[in-house]
Image: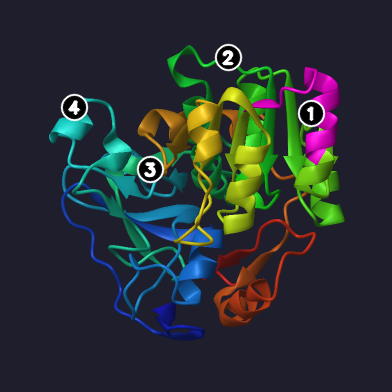
Amino acid sequence: MKGIVWHGPEEMSVEEVPEPEAGPGTVIVRPTATGICGSEIEGYLGKMGNRTPPLVMGHEFAGTVTEVGDGVDEGLLGRTVAVNPLSSDGTCRLCRAGLTNLCPNRRLVGIHSPGGFAEFTLAPAANVYPLPEGVEARTGALAEPLANGVHAARLGTAGGHPVEHAVVIGAGTIGLMCLQAAVLDGIPEVHAVEPHEGRRNQALALGAKGAHASGEEAQEALEAATGGLGADLVIDAVGAEATRRAALSLLRPGGRAVFIGLHDDDSTLGFHGVVRGQIDIQGSYAYTAADFEQALSWLVDGEAGIGELPPVLPLEDGPGAFADLVRGPSAQIKVFLSGTGS
């Protein structure tokens, strides 16, 4: 079968790869829509230490179940399913505490096993969610990025942290998902910071009360709305040193910054303001099964999305699509690939 193989920084090609075999508790999925994630762009550039070449990436995917392993409901055959690519052991101390996303034995399809940028992909049967009739694979493939947003937004209000004014930095896929999750969770005022005009417009269309080209613009708007205090919550969906600094500068005393973006590894931040302002710094990694299920529910019900869905490109276009995405953001929020040729 065909798959897109990443061989190292900016080296990617479509090749013949081994077909997966269904074992007990697993299914084979023929992906009909696999989204390219921002973390995979960083991986393509060689900036993600958790990805080892040669690798077939692709963890945001949905498709048709073509084979089931022993002990799996045969009723899944032929169903279009969304796939939660993240698995945990379910038995360690972190899993028992509900922190399944932080399980030391966690596995992610597309990192620890071949992913959705192929004609067929192996997935745990427990992690596939049949989609209702009329809901297409592209919608199901958005459940994984939206689940990240659900998790980040919920961390932003965890422990009873009061949030009336929130800011999301970045309006790419993850930023827009964080924004929608914050809005759907009931935060009254959610603003976006995004230099690209087309993406700012998308943020407004998806529920932002304001969209600003820079942190300075956002700060002016927040000062007017909060009597000079600042935001209760800032979610940085970019992860550059500049955006991490901006997140802290936008917060009120006692505010919370949730960092989900992974653009840069190292950042130098001033901590006098963090200490004196009693700022809460929170990392956000992936999601739990409950987050994924909430995300899929919102997508299926039409409460969340990315607007008009782009066409699905064939696998052969994948290496070129990665190379294009490296050049910088565009108005197109998501690129989908598929081995079906549709």
Name the residue nearer the viewer: 319 or 51. 51
Look at label 1 and name its amino acid. Answer: Leu
Question: In percent of the image, x 77 and y 64: which residue is there?
Answer: 330
Q: CA distance from mark 4 to mark 1?
A: 40 Å
Q: CA distance from mark 1 to mark 2?
A: 16 Å
| For the residues bearing labels 4 and 2, Cβ distance under 8 angstroms | no
Name the residue nearer the viewer: 4 or 64. 4
The answer to which of marks 1 and 2 sits earlier in the sequence is: 2
- Total labels drawn: 4
Helix, strand or loop under label 2: loop
Q: Where residue 134 sits: x, y (%)?
A: 63, 39
Q: Where residue 52 sits: x, y (%)?
A: 31, 74
**4 vs 1, front mark:** 1
Placement of the C terminus among the 4 image quadrants: bottom right
Q: CA distance from mark 1 to mark 3?
A: 42 Å
When the figure is inspected, residue 279 is found, relative to residue 24, above or below; the finding is: above
The part of the chain drawn in magenta is: 218-232
When the figure is inspected, residue 325 is found, relative to residue 100, above or below; the finding is: below
| For the residues bearing labels 1 and 2, Cβ distance under 8 angstroms | no
Look at label 2 and name its amino acid. Answer: Pro
Q: Is residue 126 visible?
A: no
Q: Where residue 272 sits: x, y (%)?
A: 51, 38
Helix, strand or loop under label 4: helix
| For the residues bearing labels 1 and 3, Cβ distance under 8 angstroms | no
The answer to which of marks 4 and 3 sits earlier in the sequence is: 4
Query: Mark 4 = which residue?
Result: 96
Residue 222 is tagged as 1
Placement of the N terminus among the 4 image quadrants: bottom left
Residue 162 is tagged as 2
Answer whether residue 231 is magenta in the image.
Answer: yes
